[in-house]
Image (spheres, rainbow, N blue to C red):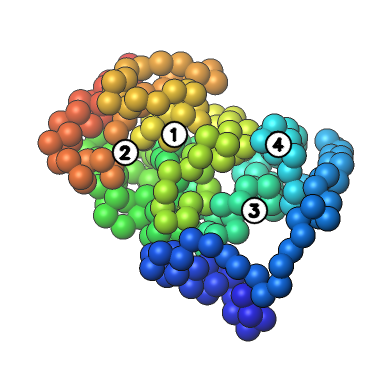
Amino acid sequence: MSNSQSFYEAKLALEWQYEFGVDEAISDAPINRYEIETVPPELKINPKSNIAHVSSMPDILSSRETASDVAKILAKNCDNLTELRDAIGLFEMCSLKKGAKNLVFSDGPSNSRVMVIGEAPTREEDSEGKPFVGAEGELVDKMFQAIGLSRRASDPNDAIYITTAIPWRPPQSRDPSSDEIAMMVPFLKRHIELINPDFIVLMGNIACSAVLNKVGINKFRGEWTEALGKKIIPMLHPRSLLRDPMRKRDAWNDLLSLKEQLNS
């Protein structure tokens, strides 16, 4: 990457090369990797330190557990949504951040009774920095409006608060790895605690993996369960519904089930 080239420009150039079959990076000079120090520096975190110090943490990790432990400490010390967003934005231990344009945090009133959790941001969501935009966002809005709910409603009883299980778009919009999901789970759990909704809608396998630690949305969608002290219903992601419109009947049945719970 040249000095005049931004990270995003370099990323686009790399994606273009990858599409043309380039699968190796060769340096101008040989590197003796046996001479490179491989032991990562010791990572020490003060649980009571301000989240602003996150930016000083080393980028090198020895294991996924290290990243998860740091995320737990940071998330635990966030007392409000602003602090949580800042902590996620300063968290350097997830490589997805480096390739994303924007942090996708949330949309909708924070006092909503219903919290909707999507998967990982799409290209459009990454560009706008908001969850569920574009065609998927239009479908989500229509789905919940059909049972009287909206991310634009002012009444908590009629509102939905939307977020994503992963805050950054993975390269090529691929599914996040299990390691990437695991290290971001502490932030998602703290997000749920701060919103404190009555009901949670998990849209798609990635959201189910993060919250319920299981996948197979086609088997258990529409089945109410409890986790983190909340009533939860898994639903198909709107991306699946756009690919297979016949599944909209399943989504409608799940929405009616949510409406029944809200009115009970």
Residue 197: x and y in percent read 49, 29
Q: CA distance from mark 2 to mark 4?
A: 31 Å
Q: Which residue is mark 3?
A: 89
Instruction: Give the amino acid type for the residue marked by disc 2 in the picture.
Output: His
Q: CA distance from mark 3 to mark 2?
A: 25 Å
Q: How many residues crowd around disc 2 within 10 Å: few (fewer than 14), some, or many (20 or more)?
A: many
Q: How many residues crowd around disc 3 within 10 Å: few (fewer than 14), some, or many (20 or more)?
A: some
- Is the Cβ of the residue at disc 3 closer than 8 Å to that at disc 2? no
Q: CA distance from mark 1 to mark 3?
A: 20 Å
| Element type at mark 2 | loop
Q: Which residue is mark 1?
A: 207
- Is the Cβ of the residue at disc 2 closer than 8 Å to that at disc 1? yes
Instruction: Give the amino acid type for the residue marked by disc 1 in the picture.
Output: Ala
Residue 145: x and y in percent read 26, 42
Q: Residue at x 29, y 20 (%)?
A: 219
Q: CA distance from mark 2 to mark 1?
A: 9 Å
Q: How many residues crowd around disc 4 within 10 Å: few (fewer than 14), some, or many (20 or more)?
A: few
- Is the Cβ of the residue at disc 1 closer than 8 Å to that at disc 4? no
Q: CA distance from mark 4 to mark 3?
A: 21 Å
> Residue 63 bears which disc, if any?
4
Q: Which residue is mark 2?
A: 237
Q: Residue at x 80, y 47 (%)?
A: 38
